[in-house]
Amino acid sequence: MATVNATADTFERLVADNDIVLVDFWAEWCGPCKQFAPVYEKASEKHEDIVFAKVDTEAEQQLAAAASITAIPTLMAFREGILVFSQAGALPGPALEQLVGAVRGLDMDEVRAQVASQGAASSS
């Protein structure tokens, strides 16, 4: 599967309706973003069961702000609708493959328990 463009209108459904979603926040003027683009595209073709989305931060400024994007490129990974990774900076191909493997290998029961305990701790 090639990369898909995500917008403010499609982002939430994209994350909610797919098991694993990687999101690349980028801009046309960003040199590191342009270097990362072919690495990201190649990974999207290799891992057809994962949604590889791209968000143009210039066109989708409200979405970028809602996602607290302060530097680009920023890569986020969602698993079962939960944000499990967020990091600024372009990843080399092997690091992106390692990330894909790590996200696939997550124990989601454990992740949900951690999210629940963080929510409980912040509300007390």
Image (cartoon, rainbow, N blue to C red):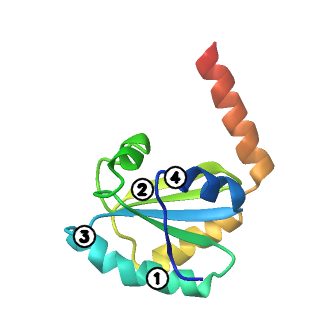
Labels 3 and 2: the sequence-earlier one: 3
CA neighbours of label 2 inside 10 A, class few (<14), some (14 to 19), many (20+): some
Q: Give the alpha-carbon distance from disc 4 to disc 2, as whole Å.
A: 23 Å
Mark 1 or 4: in front is: 4
Name the N-terminal-most of marks 1 and 4: 4
Vertical position of residue 97 compared to residue 115: above or below: below
Q: Position of residue 96 (x, y in %)?
A: 49, 74
**30 vs 11, nearest the viewer:** 11
Image position, residue 115 (x, y; %): 67, 37
Mark 4 crowdedness (10 Å alpha carbons): few <14, some 14-19, many ≥20:
few
Q: Earlier in the sequence, mark 3 or mark 4?
A: 4
Q: Is residue 59 above or below residue 2?
A: above
Whole-number angstrom distance, CA of label 1 to CA of label 3: 16 Å
* Residue at 42% over, 56% down: 87
Would you name the residue on which mark 2 appears?
87
Image coordinates of residue 8 in percent, x first then y, are 47, 51
Q: Report the amino acid beneath label 4.
A: Asp
Kindly indicate whether the residue at mark 2 contacts the one at mark 3 (C-beta within 8 angstroms): no
Q: Is residue 36 above or below residue 73?
A: below
- Work out whether mark 1 precedes mark 3 in sequence or the reverse, and give the earlier one: 3
Question: Which residue bears the numbered disc 3?
Answer: 28
The residue beneath circle 1 is 41
Q: In the image, what residue type sits under mark 3?
A: Glu
Q: Residue at x 54, y 71 (%)?
A: 52
In front here: 1 or 99?
Answer: 1
Residue at image coords 69%, 76%: 49
Query: What's the residue at 60%, 70% (across, down)?
Result: 51
Q: Nearer the viewer, mark 1 or mark 2?
A: 1
Is the Cβ of the residue at disc 1 closer than 8 Å to that at disc 3?
no
Name the residue type under label 1: Glu
Q: Mark 2: which amino acid?
A: Gln
Residue under pointer 4: 9
